[in-house]
Amino acid sequence: MSATVEAQDTQVNQEELFHFDHHHTDYEGGKFGMWLFLFTELVLFGGMFLALFVYGTGEYAADFHAAGKSLNLFKGAGNTLVLLTSSLTMVYAITALQKGSKFWALTHIAITVLLALTFMVVKYFEWTAKFEHHLFPAKIAALESIYGPSDLKKAYTTEYKESGLSIAAFNAIKVDSNGNPAPAGISAEEAKEYTHTRYTRGQVIFYGMYFTMTGLHGFHVLIGVVLLLWMFWCVLKNTVTAENFGWLENVGLYWHLVDLIWIYLFPLFYLVA
Amino acid sequence: MSHGHEQEHDHVHIVSYGSHTLVYVGLLILTGLTVAAAGIDVGAFNLPIAMLIASCKAGLVLAYFMHIKYEKTYIQAFVLGTTFFMFVVFCLTFADYATR
């Protein structure tokens, strides 16, 4: 490369620097900052994945397998397609904006938002189905009290006295086929349900991790919706444009990370377990 | 290499709709593959196979959708480094867990 061309290079670069200074943006710094944030997200979810691997491949492997079968594969796979498609419309939006088509950028952002909401609706139905089987995020700990017999006996006795039933009638609703009392602090209707559905410690851990990880992931999807709506506004008001699209790219990076996490969550919860 | 092209690479590397769609099709195929693979019981190998396919999908998303293939070397190095150290943490934990 000749000296003249190098000199030209320098000049153009300076012009470009000025151009970016003029808009008060640091494109590269912004992007790298976003990546640093994404690394912290990776560590946040990574720790949970590590716990899931250790529990799922160890002594609870059989429990995880049984519990995993109870998840709806159709809904899980459907949601995988929804998220993958939303990742596609996200990159379409960036390409559209870079090519100068504001209309298509807005359209693709809007489709991405709709797909994100679709994901959350499916998630809602999945969680509701679990609630019907008395699996609640907060109750996971209560279920585990099955395995704390000392407190249980005390609670069982107290509850029997308060119920006003005969011991035979009380036991009929409170004792399952193995002769184990149902956990304390639940109603008679719930106790009947427990006689049919008992969860082992491994299954309790599985559902605990399921609610925690898909819950945290769902929370990220909701944040993504807010960010995408904000981007829609920015593109609409021309603060994010074909010349200044760093924000849209960074929101895109976040959105793809949400997809990336689901890529691992799906097989671990719905398929392998 | 012409200067204009270089600049394009640095700042406005526009990936076409077509190549995005191609990556998407690849991701769909891999999703189908992972569901099909889970249906076959190969015992202890089910988990590694599923993780391998998931990592292929993650690689596609990272390289193309997240633009890593076109980024500067230092960003690529950071992504690679973070992934590597994450992998090391997983390996060390399992080394501990497996030898108890």
Image: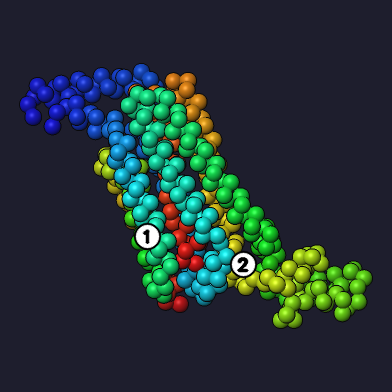
Q: Residue furthest left?
A: A2
Image quadrant where one finds the N terminus of chain A? top left
- Secondary element at image label 1: helix
Q: Between tags 2 and 1, which lies in front? A: 1
Q: Chain of mark 2?
A: A
**Residue at image location 40% in from the left, 61% down from the top:** B34
Q: Position of residue A69 (x, y in %)?
A: 54, 67
Q: Which residue is mark 2?
A: A204
Q: Answer yes or no: do the residues labelled 2 and 1 have beta carbons within 8 Å?
A: no
Residue B33, numbered circle: 1
Q: Residue at x 64, y 59 (%)?
A: A130
| Label 2: which secondary element | helix
Q: Is residue A101 visible?
A: yes
- The answer to whether residue B52 is above or below residue B65 is below
| Rendered view: B10 above or below B37 | above
Q: Would residue A58 be found to the left or right of residue A194 on screen? A: left
Type of the residue with mark 2? Val
- Tell which of A118 and A222 is nearer to you: A118
In the rendered view, tell whether residue A14 sits above or below residue B69: above
* Image spot of residue A263 (x, y percent): 43, 53
The answer to which quarter of the image holds residue A70 is bottom right
Report the number of numbered marks.
2
Residue A207 occupies which quadrant of the picture?
bottom right
Q: Nearer the viewer, residue A223 or B74?
A: A223
Specify the amino acid type for callout 1: Leu
